[in-house]
Image (tube, coloured by chain):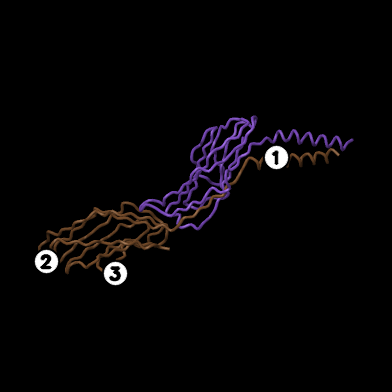
Amino acid sequence: MKTVMRSLLVAALLLFGSRAVTAQTITFGSGSGGTFTIASAVAGQDPTTVSNGAGSFTTSTKKGDGILRIRAQLDQAMPANTTLTLTLTYPAGTSQGAQVLGITPVDMIVSIPSASTTRTGTVSYSFTATASAGVLAPFTRNVSLTIVP
Amino acid sequence: MFAKFAGRTAAVLSLMAGLASAAGAQTQTVNFEVKAINQFSITSTPVTLTITTATAGSDPTPVTDNSSVWAVTTNQTNAKISASIPTDMPTGVTLGVQLAAPAGATSTAKNLASGTAQDLVTGITKVKGNALTVTYTLSATAAAGVIAADSRVVTYTMTPGT
């Protein structure tokens, strides 16, 4: 009897819990954000910035998730005198425009209203390096997108 | 019993919380590289230098022109700029040139000659420089005499660093 009660309670918790974990999700359209190679400059100017076109990401949210925001960050800092700038477009909320990424999360989209829906946005990057950055062998950074209340 | 049950419940909730956290984030890998860059430009507008005067007892007065500018970008170390002319100047006449150096580099005024290029700016390292002055100086001794209009094409070369 006790075992049955216990099982019922656990089952109830899981059921209740599964409703509580109607967590919003966010998914990149691709695991790769692309390859950025700076290889030219106009004399007298810093090396020419390289950018890529729009990748994509998808969010899934539920009504009741509250007001959400999408944040972005890197797994480690960029080398000195280089920057990675991220721009997201998204059909809801307020875009914060192009943001330079670092290891501290930055808001990309804020004030996303609660809704049970799937939305798709675009992702584009720009990579800049000053002359003083020097020559840099190939390296990678991981960009994380997070959708949070 | 309650403690045991509570422990299991906490474990279940913890697992659920972990799943919720993972579901709200995703990672994408971005690849980067910066290749060696060495870019150099200089005004291509012709420069005219005419010697017309002298102080009595001295050689004719040299003339200078600093209407030209140059620019450079390098992300390497110890690049340099050198220059040469295709044929020597007439006897008794010298054409000097000096390029203003970008930050951290060294500029040296040189008289141009055919053959070996003269190093004008050395130690150009991970820098950009724009609108840097180019100064030409034409000198002639009295012995050079009167020289009809002539020209030289100055060829500048940028040697990448490391």
* Mark 2 or 1, nearer chain start: 1
Residue under disc 3 on the same chain as residue under disc 1? yes
To the question of a shared chain for discs 2 and 3, the answer is yes
Q: Is residue A64 left or right of residue B152?
A: right
The percent position of residue B12, horizontal first and vertical second, equals 76, 40
Percent x, y of residue B129 = 35, 53
Q: Is residue A37 above or below residue B59?
A: above
Q: Amino acid at mark 1?
A: Ala
Could you give the CA–CA distance between mark 3 and mark 1, rounded to whole angstroms? Answer: 74 Å
Q: Chain of mark 2?
A: B
Chain B hue?
brown
Chain A: colour as depicted: purple
Task: Name the one closer to the observer, B146 or A119.
Answer: A119
Instruction: Give left or right: position of B124 versus A90.
Output: left
Under circle 2, the secondary element is loop
| Residue carrying label 2 | B145
User: How crowded is the residue under tag 3: few (<14 C-alpha within 10 Å), some, or many (20+)?
Assistant: few
**What residue is at 82 percent from the left and 39 percent from the top?**
B5
In the picture, the disc for residue B116 is 3
Q: CA distance from mark 2 to mark 1?
A: 94 Å
Identify the element where label 3 is drawn. Answer: loop
Asked if B30 appears above or below A18 in the picture, the reply is below
Q: Quadrant of the N terminus of chain A?
A: top right
Circle 1 is placed at which residue position?
B17
Q: Nearer the viewer, residue B99 or A115?
A: A115
- What amino acid does circle 2 point to? Gly
Horizontal placement of A125 versus A47: left or right?
right
